[in-house]
Image (cartoon, rainbow, N blue to C red):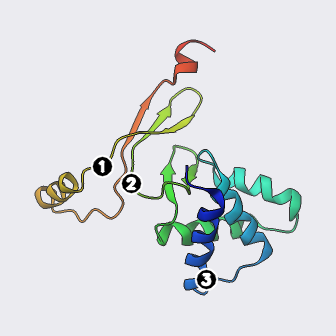
Amino acid sequence: MPDPIVRFDELITALKQRNFRLTPQRVELVRLIAASEGHPSAAQLYAKIRFRFPTMSQATVYKTLTLLKEMNQVLEIDLRDDSHYDGNRPHPHPHLICLQCNKIVDGDMDLDPSSIRKLEKTSGFQIVRPQITFYGLCSDCRQGG
């Protein structure tokens, strides 16, 4: 995981370059994303911020996450009922998702750019967001714990 302070500065700089208004609420959201060790959902981020900023809307969280996603600063992991976000490894990489507890783990495997280009050529698709997800059971759920 990158240094949360360095990652925070990178995210703030990217938002400033887009002239995005940096309210205290948005700065706190960016701080949470930069310090996140997992893959929080928008609802989880909102719940953490709401205690400090009770008037903040969920729309602000979603709007900020959408902009960061468009800027390739966060990676959206689309689950059945909710999206989760990876703000520390925004480049395409595989995720392993537990079908029982919904735990998300980063896969330690690079996506080969030449394979992606070959797939584009053979399919006719322009791939704009490569994402590989493996579904299974995490070690805790496999052991019944």
Badge 1: few (under 14), some or many (20 or more) residues near its Cα, within 10 Å? some
Labelled pair 1, 2 in contact (Cβ < 8 Å):
yes
Q: According to the image, label 2 marks what residue?
A: 92
Q: Position of residue 57 (x, y in %)?
A: 77, 67
In the rendered structure, the answer to whether residue 70 lies left or right of residue 52 reads left
**Identity of the residue drawn at 51% across and 45% down:** 79
Badge 3: few (under 14), some or many (20 or more) residues near its Cα, within 10 Å? few
Instruction: Residue at the far left: name it.
Output: 122
Instruction: Name which residue type carries label 2.
Output: Pro
Q: According to the image, label 1 marks what residue?
A: 111
In the rendered structure, the answer to whether residue 26 lies left or right of residue 72 reads right
Give the quarter of the image for residue 121: bottom left
Earlier in the chain: of badge 2 and badge 3, it is 3
Earlier in the chain: of badge 1 and badge 3, it is 3
Which secondary structure, mark 2? loop
Compared with residue 22, is residue 4 higher up or lower down, i.e. above or below?
A: above
In the rendered structure, the answer to whether residue 128 lies left or right of residue 100 reads left
